[in-house]
Image (cartoon, rainbow, N blue to C red):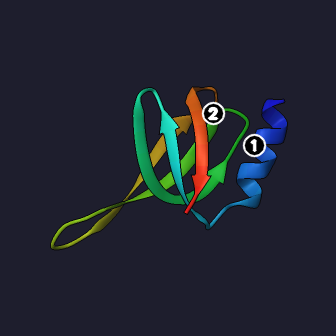
Amino acid sequence: MAALFVNELNRLTGRSVEVAFNNSMVEGVIAFARADLLGLVESVPGYAPTNQVLYIAIDAIDFVRLL
């Protein structure tokens, strides 16, 4: 079942999403998905916004919403 989820996340690479995990919710762009890890480029707002890569364990994800 996890492989199907990872395949779908890979299909969504480059898309803006909202990811809920461990009582947190973040928005960003999917960079990659592997068997156990999701890479999400999180845009940090501010005067000089920086893009930070957030690594999330696949089994910690509650849901992913397309934006």
Q: Is residue 10 above or below residue 19?
A: below
Residue shown at 18%/67% (left/top)?
46
Residue shown at 70%/60% (left/top)?
12
Residue shown at 67%/62% (left/top)?
13
Q: Which residue is mark 1?
A: 6
Residue 21, position in %: x, y? Answer: 49, 33
Q: Are the two marked residues, 2 and 1, in contact with CB atoms closer than 8 angstroms?
A: yes
Residue 11, position in %: x, y? Answer: 77, 59
Locate residue 37: give its quadrant: top right
Residue 62 got which mark? none
Assign the C terminus to one quadrant of the image. Answer: bottom right
Q: Is residue 62 above or below residue 67?
A: above
Residue shown at 44%/54% (left/top)?
27
Residue 3, position in %: x, y? Answer: 82, 36
**Which of 56 and 19 lies nearest the eye of the viewer?**
19
Q: Secondary structure at mark 2?
A: helix
Residue 58 got which mark? 2
Give the left or right position of residue 3, taking residue 66 as reference.
right
Q: Is residue 45 above or below residue 20?
A: below
Q: Is residue 59 above or below residue 11?
A: above
Q: Residues within 10 Å of mark 2 (few under 14, many from 20)?
A: some
Q: Residues within 10 Å of mark 1 (few under 14, many from 20)?
A: some
- Give the alpha-carbon distance from disc 2 to disc 1, as whole Å: 8 Å
Locate residue 58: give its quadrant: top right
Q: Secondary structure at mark 1?
A: helix
**As shown in the figure, which amino acid type bears the numbered disc 2?**
Ile
First in residue order: circle 2 vs circle 1 = 1
**Which of 55 and 26 lies nearest the eye of the viewer?**
26
Give the left or right position of residue 18, taking residue 38 as reference.
left
Give the left or right position of residue 15, taking residue 42 as reference.
right
